[in-house]
Image (cartoon, rainbow, N blue to C red):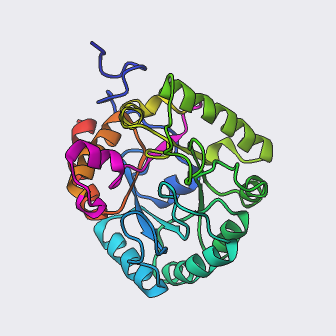
Amino acid sequence: MDKPGEMGQGYWLEGNRRGTLPPMLMDRIPDAGRRTLIMGIINVTPDSFSDGGMFSSADDALSQAIRFVEQGADILDIGGESTRPFSQPVTAEEELRRVIPAIKKIRRECSLPISIDTSKAEVAEAALDEGADIINDVTALRGDPEMGPLAARRDVPVILMHMKGTPETMQSNPSYTDVIAEVRDFFCRRIKAAEDFGISEKQIIVDPGIGFGKRLEDNLKLVRHCCNISPKGHAVLIGPSRKAFIGVLTGIEEPKERDIATVGAVIACAAAGCSIVRTHNVRFAKEALAVADAILAA
């Protein structure tokens, strides 16, 4: 049986070993690096898998952002293009129309770091110009040749996510021989590519892409062993919120009804060494992590 803290074990880590966060997050978020941070999801889209259309206006997005701040979020993640399985891409013009008004309003009212969830450099640059602080790219800089140079030029934190295929194809019979090794190898290559663009190693966060080209068993292994997927000890972000694997395990078909079950995944992420959890329900995550992080630190 594995002992707590062993490299290959990745669960209930002794000392709750986490990866290294970018300096901006360490400076702006109280206790960053000593607890699990919470990224609140704000989808300004009509078709996201669990909350499509709920926050598609800038005013609705602002209201949700204020709620998240009050509930204890550390980062706000704003996206204007659905990446649910089998979704279709939208144009940069449409994505800009959705996200920029929301970011403008939120930035005026909220001081939390803002992440722009996009794979388009044009959208990322406009968002940064309006006050966003982080680029969250589900393609890990593969979707737009200008994204890497932009991130290097602006010297902002970058989240690199693993995805097999595209949102349209990723859940068409994905398979792995060793999902941990393969995801780790992917990050070795993408971190090298990021550094070749001129992105500082200190600015990188990795995300194993739960539900993005993964089977049930792959998702479970990636959460349990998340501390082993980052080849250089970068902070790991995991987004388990309301995902289909939770529905499979619980039998809950409606994504919005999976929030309580998501808490179980959030606690497992914290226990395994994850630095940031991405969630639709900040209140539930905050309450659960207040207990889990205290136990892990004891």
Q: 68 or 137, which lies in front?
A: 137
Q: Can residue 266 be spotted in the picture? A: no
Q: Quadrant of residue 292?
A: top left
Establish if 272 lies above or below 74. above
Look at the image and say whether residue 44 sits in the magenta stretch: no
Q: Percent x, y for residue 3? A: 29, 16
Residue under the image location 65 percent in, 70 percent down:
128
Q: Which residues are magenta?
A: 231-257
What number of labels is visible?
A: 0
Residue under the image location 26 percent in, 61 percent down:
254
Q: Percent x, y for residue 103? A: 55, 77
Q: 250 or 235, which lies in front?
A: 250
Quadrant of the snapshot with the N terminus: top left
Is 41 situated left or right of 148 in this image? left
Q: Residue furthest front?
A: 172
Q: Percent x, y for residue 182? A: 56, 28
Q: Quadrant of residue 293?
A: top left
Q: Percent x, y for residue 48? A: 44, 66
Is 73 situated left or right of 208 in this image? left
Q: Can residue 290 be spotted in the picture? A: yes
Q: 67 or 262, which lies in front?
A: 262
Residue under the image location 42 percent in, 33 percent down:
218
Establish if 117 lies above or below 8. below
Q: Residue furthest bottom?
A: 59
Q: 76 or 177, which lies in front?
A: 177
Quadrant of the snapshot with the C terminus: top left
Look at the image and say whether residue 240 sits in the magenta stretch: yes
